[in-house]
Image (cartoon, rainbow, N blue to C red):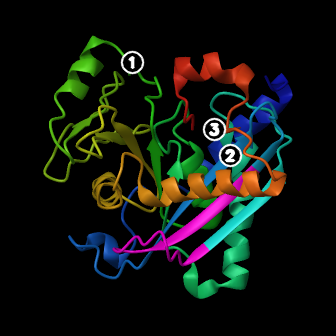
Amino acid sequence: MAAPPERRCWEREQARLKAGVVEQDTEEWQKDPNFTGLERVGGVDLSYIKGDGTSACASLVVLSYPALQVTRVLYEDCRMVAVTAPYVAGFLAFREVPFLVEAVQRLQQEEPKLRPQVLLVDGNGLLHHRGFGVACHLGVLTDLPCIGVAKNLLQVDGLARDELHREQIRSLQKSGDTFPLTGTSGRVLGMGACWVLDLSFLNAQVLRSYNNSSKPLYISVGHRVSLDTAVRLVRACCRYRVPEPIRQADIRSREYIRKQLCAPLEVRPARPESSKKEAELEDESDA
């Protein structure tokens, strides 16, 4: 756990950056039902070597859209990085986002024409204790549209993995079915024609991404995108449970580690083993 002064500093920085979050669509392609004009979708991820909480591979992958060709990716950047910031629940961005920002900056310098038009992030956006998760943090710092895609429910504003939530999951019958995450704050608009849920600090929706998957995804606005657009795009990028840009970033970061170490070593998600229990209580994807 970070020392109190460090934690307070991070809270102030989150509050400062949060003022820059844009929760609406800002691009013309976002307004088109078929995303006409969208050609490049990026995914980011960090993979760690098992037993080592300081050595990780930061990965940025850009795929063509709508083809999402994995055999001919437009751009790939995998780098080993030294992670020095501790893992603290709710502050994952301070541990990982600097490396992802650097990856985006390298792309901008080396191949500016391949800059992604949107980033899918393994983590949460506005679905966060202070309404500013990894996807928001990365979006504000890069000024790119960002979408948070988490595999586990972050329990905030009264949201819980209780019987009601399990019943909502069971109600998802086919690919693309959704239900809104409604907190107890009273600031809920509910399901509308655009499937938009608006909590002043919570903006998320659940999507069953693959017919054969019994586990939903938790989608939230990161930056410069509406919830409706975020849900539609994640659905369009799913061939399996996890959207292809994120899936490829994860696969390629793991493979990069194996090649670097010249051995089939096990790699793990971006969490120290000591934080596993805490992560299970909150959200393995954190924010």
Few, some or many C-alpha atoms within 10 Å of disc 2 (few <14, some 14-19, many ≥20)?
Answer: many
The reply to whether residue 98 is visible in this rendering is: no
Dots 2 and 3: beta carbons under 8 Å? yes
Few, some or many C-alpha atoms within 10 Å of disc 1 (few <14, some 14-19, many ≥20)?
Answer: some
Which quadrant is the C terminus positioned in? top right
Q: Inspect the image, locate mark 2, and give the three-letter code of the amino acid beneath it.
A: Ser
Name the residue at 43% across, 58% down.
244
Asked if residue 168 lies in the magenta stretch, the reply is no
Location of residue 230 in the rendering, given as x and y in whole percent from the top left corner: 35, 56
Q: Which residue is mark 1?
A: 160
Of residue 101 and residue 136, the one placed in the foreground of this image is 101
Of residue 256 and residue 47, the one placed in the foreground of this image is 256
Location of residue 21 in the rendering, given as x and y in whole percent from the top left corner: 52, 55
Name the residue at 29% across, 21% down.
165
Q: Which residue reaches farthest top?
A: 163
Which quadrant is the N terminus positioned in? top right
Q: Which residue is mark 2?
A: 47
Of residue 3 and residue 261, the one placed in the foreground of this image is 261
Disc 2 and disc 3: Cα gap in Å? 5 Å
Q: Which residue is mark 3?
A: 269
Q: Range of the magenta residues?
A: 57-75
Q: Secondary structure at mark 2?
A: strand
Q: Secondary structure at mark 1?
A: loop
Q: Which residue reaches farthest front?
A: 263
Quarter of the image for residue 9 reads top right
Disc 2 and disc 1: Cα gap in Å? 27 Å
Q: Inspect the image, locate mark 1, and give the three-letter code of the amino acid beneath it.
A: Ala
Q: Is residue 84 left or right of residue 109?
A: right
Name the residue at 25% across, 47% down.
196
Location of residue 138 in the rendering, given as x and y in whole percent from the top left corner: 61, 56
